[in-house]
Amino acid sequence: MPNDTGFVPHDTRADVVDAAISGLSASPKTLPPTLFYDAEGCRLFYEITRQPEYYLTRTETVLLRSIAPTLVPDGFGDAVLVEFGGSDESKARILLDRPDTSFQTYVSIDVAEVALRAMRDRLEVSHPGLTVVPVVADFMQPLQLPALGSPRMGFFPGSTIGNLDPAAATRFLAAARVSLGADAWFLLGADLRKSPRVLLPAYNDAAGVTAAFNLNLLRRLNREAAADFKLDGFRHEAIWNDRDSRIEMHLVSDREQSVCLAGRRIDFFEGESIHTENSYKHTEQRLVAIARDGGWEAQRVWKDPAGWFGIFLLRGG
């Protein structure tokens, strides 16, 4: 990636600055993956999902479509679908578009307010009989949902659960159970553990889109945290951590260098990395155990023919 020549700092954002200073002052250095998703980051992530190596979105979508006709439990009528992290309704529509859909209300929870408004406008045109309730919030924080009736089904697709370490995944599922209330259901999509020969290319595509996505995080810090990262001084790296069963994404410094961020100097030695994201790849049994620890019992598990991806139907215990 080229240098950001002609850089002129914009007004800093306190939350971005605080997150960056906290992570880059740690040892080893980290940055939170929430910083990926500025407008350009969202665009690049969409491009990632279209790369031939990135099987996750295609596999989950095909699997959702195949199970949708038999997904909803008996007696599940006039229901509320609650998607966590849903600023794009594409996967929810697979459930909402069923001819005999039981969902009369769709609640989407995300921090991206503009994207949520656009989603609501689209669904008001395509699904005029559906009540659409966007909720601007961090779904990892305690959340009280509007009183919209029951039964309720939580929806967490895209293997986002894999971006949380097991303890955080358990906390999220436990909080979601409280938010959804008694007798709720939960539909969880998760990428499963498999050979690194399949996993690693999905996070290091030949076209370099994932690399651009990772490096865009530094460009965002240049813009919003008064930083002066030289993008050609860092490279994207994805590795498989077998012990922890996760893909790790890193930005590795190609040389000894110093960066200024919000008036602070941050030094890098050659080969030092910024750890930007984890993507855990659990077995089916491990995911069922994490769900149980969060207060849910697995009722049914569907997998694609290759066993790469799983969709778990959970019931509040």
Image (spheres, rainbow, N blue to C red):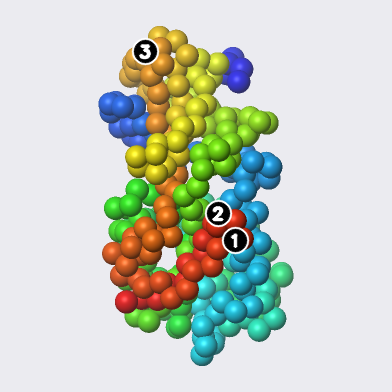
Q: Which of pointers 3 and 1 indicates the residue nearer the eye?
A: 1
Q: CA distance from mark 3 to mark 2?
A: 38 Å
Q: Which of pointers 3 and 2 indicates the residue nearer the eye?
A: 2
- Res. 12 in view: no
Q: Is residue 235 above or below residue 50?
A: above
Q: CA distance from mark 1 to mark 2?
A: 6 Å
Q: Amino acid at mark 3?
A: Phe
Q: CA distance from mark 3 to mark 1?
A: 44 Å
Callout 1: SS: loop
Residue 198 vs residue 276, the one in the foreground:
198
Look at mark 3 in the image and give the residue it sits on. 269
Look at mark 1 in the image and give the residue it sits on. 304
Residue 304, position as x, y percentages in the image: 59, 61
The numbered mark at residue 308 is 2
Q: Name the residue: 62% across, 73% down.
A: 68
Question: In the rendered structure, are the residues bearing label 1 and label 2 in contact, judged by CB atoms less than 8 Å apart?
Answer: yes
